[in-house]
Amino acid sequence: MLAKSGPPGEGPYPWRYPGSGKVQVGSGTTISGTKCTPGTPQFNSPYADPCIAKFTGNNGGATYNGVTGTTITLAMRTFPQTANSEEAAAVAKQEGIAVAAVSDQVAQVFINYFNKVYDLYGRHVKLVEEHSVSNATAELLNGNQSQACADADTIAHTLHAFGEVDFTLDPNGTGGGGTGPFSVCAAKDGLVEFNGGAYFDEAWYQQYNPYIWGIPQECQRIAVMTGQVYGKYLANKPAIYAGDPALRTKKRVFGIYVPNLPTYGVCVKESINYLVQHYHVSRSLIHVFTYGLDIATFQTSAQQAIVAFKASGVTTIITACDSFSLGLLTKAAAAQDYHPEWLLNGVALDDTDTVAQTYDQAEVTGTLFGLSEASPENTFFGPNSLAGKLYKQLTGHTIPPGTDGGYTDLVWIFDALQAAGPDLTPQNLARGVHALPTLGGPNYVYGAWSWNSGPSGKPGTGDHTAVTDDRWVYWDANATSPINGQKGTYIPVFGGKRYSLNNWPATLPPLFTAAGSKSSA
């Protein structure tokens, strides 16, 4: 049974860091000299752990592989550049993402700072690089298991690291090491993978507990969320937001475009079953098209999917895909004179302005809407973001555009390490993380972070990913984005409020009102 938790400010915390009774939570003075009271974070961020008094005494020394009395070694996998990685970098540049060298410089500023303000019980984080013998694309396609395991073996037994971070500070390399195949190998070698198996299901994470973690919602939660919200607002109703007038009078027929990884397939089935069982949607009204995560095949897959969806009478395409593929889908649909509704499920930055600006704008005007896990882009990029304000505080300079320097990843990693207590092991890290209160309030810029409620939303059942809530948005191609001053931005519904499972409002208000439509779903 997981320890119960509650938000800061409710008096004495109903949890403790594991491993030592000497850690004082919510009182005393922090390692950086800040007065620590109940409700005060470890540093000035709503996503930081509750503060603790500066630890004194014996931390236990080498409590685990990669841990000494003074250091915690974490590895960064770096892949060699390939045609695929170069294409991905070009797409990222088109979407306004800063180049790796810029992001890495910002990240290093944050790492240096977090090593000073987080209490790691006499230790500090040391990052080391592992030059992968694998191929990132092959791993994304669920292959290269033996090469991924060779990397994990090197990290565990040659570099002697505690875990892997899923980013790189090498401006000439390609990072993102937390693939499914590598995460499995890491767990078997006793490594903590801090951002592994993005959008995999919670059952998969449980299988490798306590080693694999992540920030974005795992796909079982997404499946229940989409089932609940699509069912409540859209199912068995006319597709009134389709671009083609002939589709607007037809009952919605859903088409799901999703990568062909087995774990994603499990969650797609769960979402479909939810719609069928709870909202009586006929299975004949739901079509699934799967594609491979090889950027070289993205355009062909998108074209084939559009032909299949159009032939099946799909009125509403659920975009459970990467952002580049969604752009290709919109262009392929326009070429086929096919104008359905485009329904977001909130993954892979499809719901951010600079990405959506790359879509075929005639195709998505008045037709693109749905769930958004991301908050408005100017709240996590730019000078007014949490990352931007901290960077300005530390350097006196404005944060470069198109990057947060990995702020969210780094805050999560340092949160987990502090929550583990001085006796740093994967098991104690899990106990500490599951016992943390919900982080991010009151604005929840990166969503509500909680590891206490399972994918059905039931409290106390535990989870291995952080975000638990979403917004509802629609695309306005004529409005100006606050992130870059260009045309096109997402408009929040419900005043921008975020909702978790089982808490959404009863009805959906009219969408596209800024674009002139007064209809409601």
Image (tube, grey):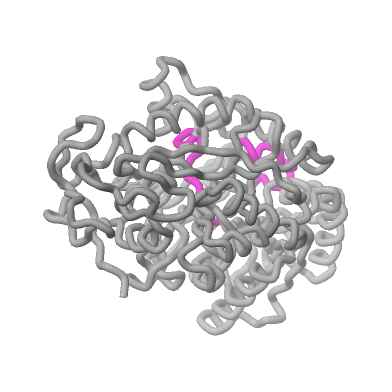
Asked whether residue 404 appears in the rendered view, the answer is yes
Position above or below: 35 against 467:
above
Drawn side of residue 285 relative to residue 441, left or right:
right
Q: Residue at x 42, y 29 (%)?
A: 112
Q: Which residue is drawn at 84% across and 40% down?
A: 83
Q: Is residue 72 magenta?
A: no
Question: Which one is nearer the viewer's eye here, 214 or 441?
Answer: 214
Name the spot of residue 4 as percent of width and height, x first. Answer: 25, 67
Q: Which residue is drawn at 59% across and 53% down?
A: 157
Residue 274, by quadrant, is bottom right
Drawn side of residue 150 relative to residue 86, left or right:
left
In this rendering, the count of numbered labels is 0
Q: Residue at x 29, y 43 (%)?
A: 121
Residue 346, by quadrant, is bottom right
Residue farthest to the top?
Answer: 396
Chain part drawn in magenta: 354-380
Position above or below: 37 against 106:
below
Name the spot of residue 229 as percent of width and height, x first. Answer: 50, 66
The quadrant of the picture occupied by the N terminus is bottom left
Position above or below: 280 against 88:
below
Drawn side of residue 247 relative to residue 404, left or right:
right
Name the spot of residue 263 as percent of width and height, x first. Answer: 64, 70
Asked whether residue 412 appears in the rendered view, the answer is no
Question: Which one is nearer the viewer's eye here, 77 or 455?
Answer: 77
The quadrant of the picture occupied by the C terminus is bottom right
Question: Which one is nearer the viewer's eye here, 245 or 87?
Answer: 87
